[in-house]
Image: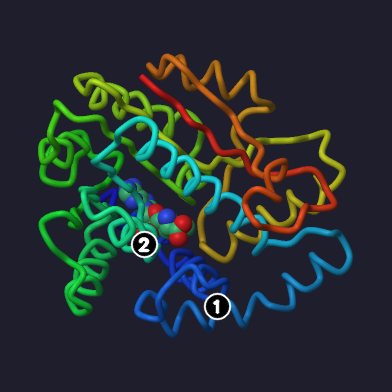
Amino acid sequence: MSERVLHSHISPSAHFTAYVWYRRGLSDAAFISTFGQFSHGVLRPVMWAGRQFFDLDLESMLLLRHLQIDAGLHRAIESSGVRQVVEIACGLSPRGHRFTQRYPQLCYLEADLPAMAERKRQLLADNGWLNDQHRVVSIDVFAESGPSSLASAFAQLNQNEPVLVITEGLVNYFPRKQIELFWTRLAVQLKPFPVASYVTDLYPELEAHPRYRQIRWGVDLVGKLTRGEYYLHYANADAIDAGFKACGFAGVEVVDPSLRATDLGLPVPTVPGLVRVVHARM
Ligand SMILES: C[S@@+](CC[C@H](N)C(=O)[O-])C[C@H]1O[C@@H](n2cnc3c(N)ncnc32)[C@H](O)[C@@H]1O
């Protein structure tokens, strides 16, 4: 079975998150799908119960990670002169559209498995948003070579300019050893650039978290719904730091976006944060 087929069970969740971004005013209606709206409706009672009984608000957690990644990208563009961005596993996220509208000088390369990449390319083209500055390529983060490999996508960039790579909603779908393989190959690709960094969300295995049992249940549910597994990586910020450094990154900042909720314009959660946003630089 090809890797593309193996990982295609993850793609439906991109429709769900796309609907959340739209519902919360971060996206255009062009990015939503009937399936996204349907899956949101199906999960609504589960999300309600999470809020009502456990103070766990799935949508707010998703927004925290999304807006914290946005904040890292704004900072990279405005303070570090980043002019090229690669968003891997972009799904139906509106970020590329929002940022290319806001920063017309930006070169934004979106990337996903071939079927999702084609869908995104068509969506952008249909709305007149696809151009030389904003493109979509096929990528399988585990392809060692060939047209869908990391190397093939990075060959399209200017290696004399700073670059920032983003993944969101990808890394916890894979066992740690496998995702570390991707990070190691990514670090190799980033080496030639004068300034290069990588921003990703990551859900750690927080055994001491007061809602740990409910989280494990939720993680198993996501696994069942997507007919795959969902893995929690690393026990704390030190372990994340060590893990990324072992993959070839020189500096690692681990942010708990729940501690920045007010700055991000979101309500402060009543339980400790579950998601981390990792800024790793070469
Ligand atoms: C949960 S969705 C997240 C989409 C988007 N980043 C967001 O936050 O709305 C996960 C995405 O990862 C993509 N994906 C899954 N396996 C992949 C792989 N091996 N290489 C690249 N992308 C992959 C899926 O196609 C899907 O679009």
Residue 183 placed where, x, y %? 38, 29
Residue at x-position 22% and y-position 59%? 114
Residue at x-position 62% and y-position 20%? 239
Instruction: Residue under label 2, please give it.
Output: 98
Which tag, 1 or 2, sits closer to the chain's start? 1
**Quarter of the rendered image showing ligand 1:** bottom left
Q: Residues within 10 Å of mark 1 (few under 14, many from 20)?
A: some
Residue 136 placed where, x, y %? 20, 57
Discs 1/2, front: 2
Find numbered disc 1 in the image and state the secondary structure of the residue it sits on: helix
Residue 15 in which image quadrant: bottom left
Q: Return the residue nearer the eye: 94 or 139.
A: 94
Residue 89 placed where, x, y %? 36, 52
In the displayed structure, 135 sits above or below 120; it is above
In the displayed structure, 250 sits above or below 64; it is above
Q: Is residue 23 left or right of residue 265?
A: left
* Beta carbon at label 1 within 8 Å of ligand 1: no
Residue type for callout 2? Arg
Display colour scheme: rainbow
Residue at x-position 56% and y-position 40%? 202
Q: Is residue 107 left or right of residue 186?
A: left
Q: Are marks 1 and 2 in contact (CB under 8 Å)?
A: no
Q: CA distance from mark 1 to mark 2?
A: 24 Å
Residue 190 in which image quadrant: top left
Find numbered disc 2 in the image and state the secondary structure of the residue it sits on: helix
Residue type for callout 1? Ser
Q: Is residue 224 left or right of residue 176?
A: right
Residue at x-position 29% and y-position 64%? 116
Label for residue 39? 1
* Beta carbon at label 2 within 8 Å of ligand 1: no
Q: Quadrant of the C terminus?
A: top left
